Image: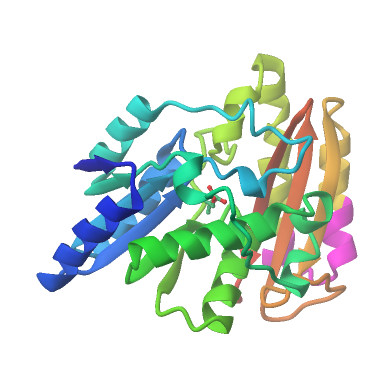
Amino acid sequence: MIVVKTIKEVRETVKQWKKEGLTVGFVPTMGYLHEGHQSLIKAADKGNDRVVVSIFLNPMQFGPTEDLATYPRDLERDKAKCLEAGADLIFAPEPEEMYTDNFQSFVDMHLLTEELCGLTRPVHFRGVCTVVTKLFNIVKPDRAYFGKKDAQQLAVIKRMVTDLNMDIEIIGCPIVREDDGLAKSSRNTYLNAEERKAALVLSKAVRKAEELIKSGVRESADIISQMTDIVNAEPLAKIDYIKVVSLDTMQQITKFTDSALVAMAVYIGKTRLIDNYFYEGE
Ligand code: PAF
């Protein structure tokens, strides 16, 4: 496995692979990898000849009061996780490599970014779209892999790739959970023992949504109200949102038939966690 810090080195390596007729899978990350990221790397390894993983804590997608400064980092640990999962190249640039002093260009999106996390994190998706576009231009992968835990991000990236005619296949991979149900997240490391226990209300509420939908409930208000009761029963939890949205537009829907995304963001103490249930029909 190669570890590089410059755009030039990534381009040279990928160019050589392409010359040899090899396909390239790409997994963009912000580091502090867990089994969720490793499942993306493994999927990329299965579907491609070579796998590139980027490790870049992108300052542009964090608001001024968010956790950029405290976000966990450990490149040595990340290298071991990448190697174990089957990566061939890690791109771990410094911020100056990605954003020069005179940086002026941004990729922005309407509608899909306006609900859910976009409401409480107004600059977030502009930062995500901009950095992912840059990374796609640097790596030029055949396929890129994103987790379904960040369901809105996955929908936004799919829309961006279609709208801007990027010749990359976007693949969404299932949420990976701890044994007790908590969705894996680098931010879980912020939780103390008491908060870690309290955080189980998210997966409990998501399971309730799944159960209700599987039993035939299609009214969003019924699902949201039962999930809200579960979260509100936990004193350390504070709801940011629990919503049912269309998979295509990320706009709220009151009733659904074929598909829907039930998405939630909840503060456990100071830590904001997300979870969701994708309903994609019977
Ligand atoms: O999902 C993430 O970790 C980030 O939003 C991404 C896609 C790596 C862009 O910085």
Q: Is residue 83 above or below residue 134?
A: above
Main structural element of the magenta stretch: helix, strand or loop?
A: helix
Residue positioned 49% across, 28% down in the render: 73
210 within the magenta span: no
The one nearer the camera, 159 or 209, is 159
Does residue 254 appear left or right of residue 73 in this picture? right
Is residue 218 highlighted in magenta?
Answer: yes
Q: Is residue 251 left or right of residue 232?
A: left
Type of colouring: rainbow
In this view, 203 is above or below 252: above
Q: Which residues are magenta?
A: 211-225
Percent across and percent down for residue 25 are: 31, 62
The x, y position of residue 250, in whole percent, is: 74, 70
Q: Residue at x 74, y 46 (%)?
A: 205
Would residue 56 be visible to someone looking at this image? no
Q: Residue at x 46, y 37 (%)?
A: 31
> Residue 165's x, y, as percent?
49, 84
Residue shown at the point (77%, 77%) measured from the top left: 256
Q: Nearer the viewer, residue 25 or 243?
A: 25
| Residue 169, image quadrant | bottom left
Question: Is residue 146 something one can see in this rendering?
Answer: yes
